[in-house]
Amino acid sequence: MPARILDDVAPAARAKGHLSVGADADLVALDPAAVTDTATYADPTRPSLGIRHLYVAGQPVVTDGTLQTDALPGRPLRGEPR
């Protein structure tokens, strides 16, 4: 449902937010008791903890809590001017 908020300003969002063959789905498996941000002003790119698995466009980006730094499968979701 959150993806539907973007439908009017970013038509590419219509392909998001559901799981089915050919869908453009991003999935995250997390431990809600362990999720926390580790970034600081001095080190703003430190990854969060508690994210067990993350798939973007079907490709693993986080596996068993480890960030795959060479994985860059995402594409920007841009709005269109009205």
Image: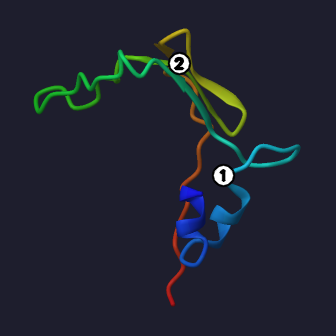
Q: Amino acid at mark 2?
A: Gln
The residue beneath circle 2 is 68
Q: Residue at x 52, y 73 (%)?
A: 79
Residue 45 point in image, percent of width and height: 29, 29
Left or right of 3 in this view: 25: right
What SS does tag 2 mark? loop
Q: Residue at x 35, y 22 (%)?
A: 35
Q: Quadrant of residue 77?
A: bottom right
What SS does tag 1 mark? loop
Q: Nearer the viewer, mark 1 or mark 2?
A: 1
Residue 80 point in image, percent of width and height: 54, 79
- Taking depth in this image into account, of 77 and 37 the one nearest to the observer is 37
The numbered mark at residue 36 is none
Residue 63 point in image, percent of width and height: 58, 14
Tell which circle, 1 or 2, labels the residue nearer the N-terminal end: 1
Spatial separation of the CA atoms under disc 1 and disc 2: 23 Å
Q: Residue at x 22, y 32 (%)?
A: 44
Residue 32 point in image, percent of width and height: 41, 22
Left or right of 49 in this view: 63: right
- Count residues near mark 2 (Cα–Cα under 10 Å), then give few for <14, some for 14-19, many for 20+: few
Q: Residue at x 59, y 50 (%)?
A: 75
Q: Amino acid at mark 1?
A: Gly
Q: Quadrant of residue 6?
A: bottom right
The residue beneath circle 1 is 17
